[in-house]
Every structure is written in C-alpha cells, then in structure tokens.
Amino acid sequence: MKKSSALETDRLFLLPTSEEDASFIMELVNTPKWLKYIGDRNIKSIEDARNYIREKMLPQEERLGFGNFTVVRKTDQQRLGTCGLYDREGLEGFDIGFAFLPEFEGRGYAFEAADELLKVALSKFALKEISAITTKENVASQKLLEKLGLIFIKMTTIPNDSEELMLYKIKNA
C-alpha cells in the first residue's frame, strides 16, 4: 500500500485524508457550494462519510500514492477544506480539485494549498499534465485555477454527467 506524504506550506498542513476525517468530510460535502458545484454525494451520517473515504478516496491513494488531502491550519489544527489530485474518468491527466468550508473561503487558503499540491504534482510525482473542471457559474473556482496558471481549454462533459463543464489544463514544462 502506497501512502501520501503530508505536505506543508507557511500556514497549512495538507494531510492525506483518512477515516478519522469522517465528521469533517460529512460537514464539507453538505455545504451549499459543494452541493451546488460538485454534487450531492448522499452522505448523511459519519458512517456514510467513512464509507465514502474508504471506497472513493483511499483506493486511488493506495494505487498511485496520492489523492485527497485534508487541509489543516497550523495555528489551531482546524480542518479548513480539502485539496487533491484525482484520476477522474473522462479526463486526461489528473484533476486538481479543492473545496473549503464557507467560513474559510476568501482567505487565500485554497490558493496556498492548491499551489503547493500543484508544485509537488509536477515535480515529485512527475505528472505531465494537470487538468481541472468547473461549472460556468463557479467564478471563484475559475479565478483560482487561472491564478494557479491553468488555462481554459474548452467546454467538456465527463461520463455519467450531462452538464457542460469548463476544462482547464497546465502542462509540466
């Protein structure tokens, strides 16, 4: 079994998501923005969240050595959000994604976490290309992706989802 290493920035730890994060994951996936922009994962209990982590997050980490990270503030160990690289069906390369609790948005945490993960993905993991998808309505996500250096490529769809999504990419130099 491969295991992601923790990552660190000035203000944050990015820790591989584990079953101990179940109550936090349950809260995050039921926030209004998650439900609107990412979709309902039907997680209504801590046990549902544990199963989601076990079945959806941990297998990729075990297979590839990276996946979803829980973003934790250093000063008080508060869980703020998630940031990860996902082997998503229907996309070339790996998909970088992020989501934060509403009270921690707009403070630069998502950029700080995603920027660090992007650097590690392109150097340590030696990934050739990183993709990202977002809805047309999610302007905050679009701005963050552009600030990270990803470039809008085209509108696309992914398997089992009819909604047109904006596809962004960055290639390893």
Image (cartoon, rainbow, N blue to C red):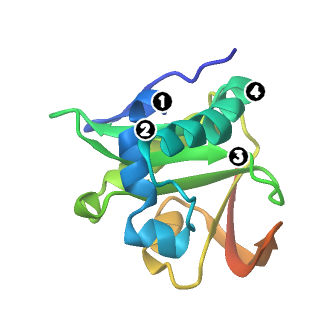
Q: Of the residues shown, which amino acid type is indicated by label 4?
A: Arg
Q: Earlier in the sequence, mark 4 or mark 2?
A: 2
Which residue is located at x 83 percent, y 66 percent?
159
The residues bearing labels 4 and 3 have C-alpha atoms spaced at a distance of 22 Å
Instruction: Name the quadrant containing residue 40.
Output: bottom right
- SS at circle 4: helix
* Disc 2 + disc 1, Cβ < 8 Å: yes
Place of residue 107 in the rendered image (x, y in percent of width and height, measured from the top left): 24, 59
Q: Earlier in the sequence, mark 4 or mark 3?
A: 4
Q: Can residue 67 be seen by looking at this rendering?
A: no
The kind of residue tagged 1 is: Glu
Query: Which of 110/45 is in front?
Result: 45
The amino acid type, in three-letter code, at marker 2 is Ala
Q: Tag 3: residue type? A: Asn
Residue position for label 3? 172
**Among all residues in the image, which is located at the extreme left?**
75
> In the image, which is nearer the foreground, mark 2 or mark 3?
2
Q: Which residue is mark 2?
A: 22
Q: Secondary structure at mark 3?
A: loop
Residue 19 — which label?
1
Judged from this view, the residue extending furthest toward the top is 1
